[in-house]
Image: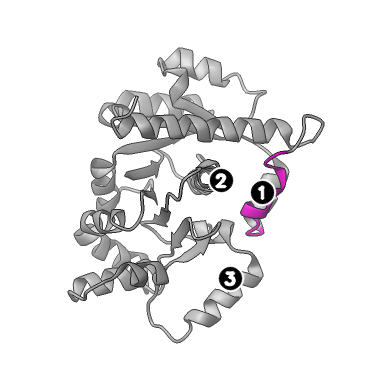
Amino acid sequence: MKVAFWSNTRGRSCVTSNLACISVLSTLSSSDQRRTIVLENHQNILNLGNALFSQQSRQEVRENKSYQVEYGLSRLLRSMEEGEKISENTVLRYAENFLGKKLFYLPAGGTRNQEMLEYRLERDCVRTIKFLEQYGDLVLVDTAAAPLASSRKILRQADLVVVNLSQNRQMLDHFFRNYSEIRKKAFYLIGNYDEGSELTRGEVIKRYEIPGSQLGIIPHNVQFSDALSDGELIPFLLRNYHCGESDCNYHFMASVKEAADLFERQLALANGGD
């Protein structure tokens, strides 16, 4: 299945951190050997790799890749352009893996600039993501809010679009007025959720007529934010996954685990399940 994580606004809706969090929790809660591949269609200092890698492991990755001009997604795009035969092992070798080789991150890797990456993705993103579906049960794409042609193509092809919302009335109004097509296959997340806001989860559900089963929240949490900044998201979530009610992170973990569960249910519906 193909899932696009997207927002109608830039810099306010926590698309990257939401995707990183949900991908890890969904992997942890999955009882089977489902393989998830995550990637982004843009370059950014704050990317999925920054959340999933510690500073030390990022340095090791740079050293391991230093002999390659291109790696990750860029290398895969190059191989496809040149008509190379690409095996499952080759694809997975281009990626970094986590959680017992159940979660794979395919970094943008090695392209000289965003314009070149977008040129290649505009041409081949649909074919590339379909190709990745052969080797990953779930392909999650961090899709830029900027008006990129590749983003439009990915959104059209996605089986499910996770729309990342913020507690801002103008931004909410803008989305629900202008994106009726995306709403037909949308699941919603509010990242950096502030329970003190007037725009609570319940108010958003009521005001914009969203089924409660289609809206999850990822509350504001300083330790979560620090873990993202330090590349320690996976250890943070593992450490707190079974925390008790007296733990300071209990409310946060209960909320994000519920969001991941709602996401899984929406995936099942999009896949033709009950």
Q: Say whether residue 234 is magenta.
A: yes
Residue 154 in the image: state x and y as whole percent.
28, 47
The answer to whether the residues at label 2 and label 1 have Cβ atoms under 8 Å apart is yes
Residue occupied by mark 2: 28
The secondary element bearing badge 2 is classed as helix
The residue that mark 3 highlights is 58
Disc 2 from disc 3: Cα separation? 23 Å
- Stretch in magenta: 230-242
Label 3, residues with CA under 10 Å away: few <14, some 14-19, many ≥20 = some
Type of amino acid at the residue the image marks with label 1:
Leu
The nearer-to-camera label among 3 and 1 is 1
In front here: 181 or 264? 264
The circle on residue 238 is 1
At horizontal 65% and vertical 57% (from top left) the residue drawn is 232
Q: CA distance from mark 2 to mark 1?
A: 9 Å
Q: Amino acid at mark 3?
A: Arg
Q: Which quadrant of the figure has residue 268?
A: top left
Q: Which color scheme did the rendering employ for the protein?
A: one colour
**Farthest residue in the right direction?**
246
Q: Position of residue 187 (x, y in %)?
A: 40, 31
Under mark 2, the amino acid is: Leu
Dot 3 lies on which element? helix
